[in-house]
Image (cartoon, grey):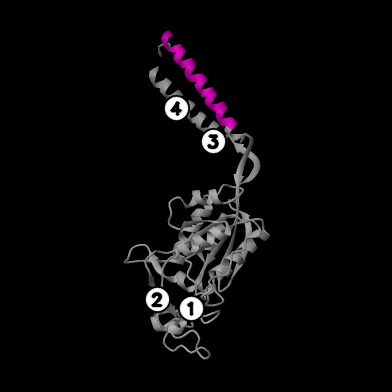
Amino acid sequence: MDRPARPAAWPAMKAGLALLALGAGLAALAAATPSVPARTSVRNILFTVDITGSMNVRDYGPSQAPRSRLDEVRRRLPALIRELPCGSRAGLAVFAERQSFTFFRPVEVCANYTPLAETVERLDWRMGWDGDSRISSGLNSALRFAAADGADLVFLTDGHEAPPLPHGGRRPMRNEGGVGGLIVGVGADRPSPIPRHDERGREIGFYRMEDMVHGARIGAPAPTASSEPGFHPRNNPYGEADLSGTEHLSALRAGYLEAMASEAGLGFARLDDPSLSARLMADTRAIPLAGRRDLSPFFAIASLAAAVSTLLVNRRTR
């Protein structure tokens, strides 16, 4: 015959039953998905990626298996989008030649993360429609597209202009829509060779110095042009300075991009900056969004704690 429970154990048993009932009640509350009104800040961003030839330069990762700049953008950009708070919107565009082209306008990031990430991962330099790379014109184009959607801009580029800018310099920045955002610098500071491809898109080596134009032949000649070999005031006012140089190599032109960003009212950060996500949030406009905060996780944790406490009480009564 079982012995009756000791009188001293009754308080502990009652406590265990109370904790069990509390845990069941908290679990029921968690299942009901309770929520409270809450306000949060979201973002609306058009991400624009440079897909010109210099973005094929491999200067990321280990030397035995380096990754191209575009590969690194494909690897890091989905994670950057994922860190945006739900309710934020993200669109995607690419830049080549002198203009940007929007693939899709900003959509909500949490509900559409998979198509956003998969589109980024499929970006390819072969999508480009021309071999030139006029960064300043492409940035102005992207600013206009972002302004039309009321969005901010994140423009990812190495800053490599091709062909070289004329002596008079680049076009001025025009951010008439008050767009916020960042220019994100892609690439290393040390120059690296630019891969060369045939007409079918197959890599066939690297560009050599003699393959490239190393100076502009538009706009006013530089004041020093008259001292260049081959100069003629009428027939060759630029001389032959464009026949040699380092345009077959490419490095991140951070100073150039920082100056452009400052003129456009944008921030600047490097792609591999550990604080890139925080910089993005700081340099884009916060949009207040009314919503509700789900309390289910709190009730679920409390229910679990009550269940664990019940087990501990039962062990002590044995």
Residue 297 circle label: 3
**Which residue is label 1 attached to?**
223
Task: Magenta stretch: give its range.
Answer: 6-29
Q: Which of marks 3 and 1 is nearer the N terminus?
A: 1
Residue 246 circle label: 2
Q: Which of 273 and 205 is in front in this view?
A: 273
Q: Distance between the residues labelled 4 and 3?
A: 17 Å
Residue 18 is a magenta residue:
yes
How far across and down, in percent of the image, does residue 212 sit? Answer: 44, 81
* Tag in front: 4 or 3: 3
Label 1 SS: loop
* Tag in front: 2 or 3: 2
Q: How far apart are marks 1 and 2 (CA)?
A: 21 Å
Q: Earlier in the sequence, mark 4 or mark 3?
A: 3
**Which residue is label 4 attached to?**
308
Q: How far apart are marks 3 and 1 (CA)?
A: 70 Å
* Disc 3 to disc 1: CB gap under 8 Å: no
Q: How far apart are marks 4 and 2 (CA)?
A: 68 Å
Give the residue type that dot 3 points to.
Answer: Pro
Q: Which residue is drawn at 55% across and 68% down?
A: 136
Q: Which residue is drawn at 54% across and 32% down?
A: 298
How far across and down, in percent of the image, does residue 119 sit? Answer: 55, 63
Q: Main secondary structure of the magenta part?
A: helix
Residue 261 is a magenta residue:
no
Q: Nearer the viewer, residue 6 or 137?
A: 137
Q: Residue at x 55, y 56 (%)?
A: 266
Give the residue type that dot 4 points to.
Answer: Val
Q: Quadrant of the N terminus?
A: top left
Q: Which of marks 4 and 1 is nearer the N terminus?
A: 1
How far across and down, in percent of the image, does residue 48 sit? Answer: 56, 63
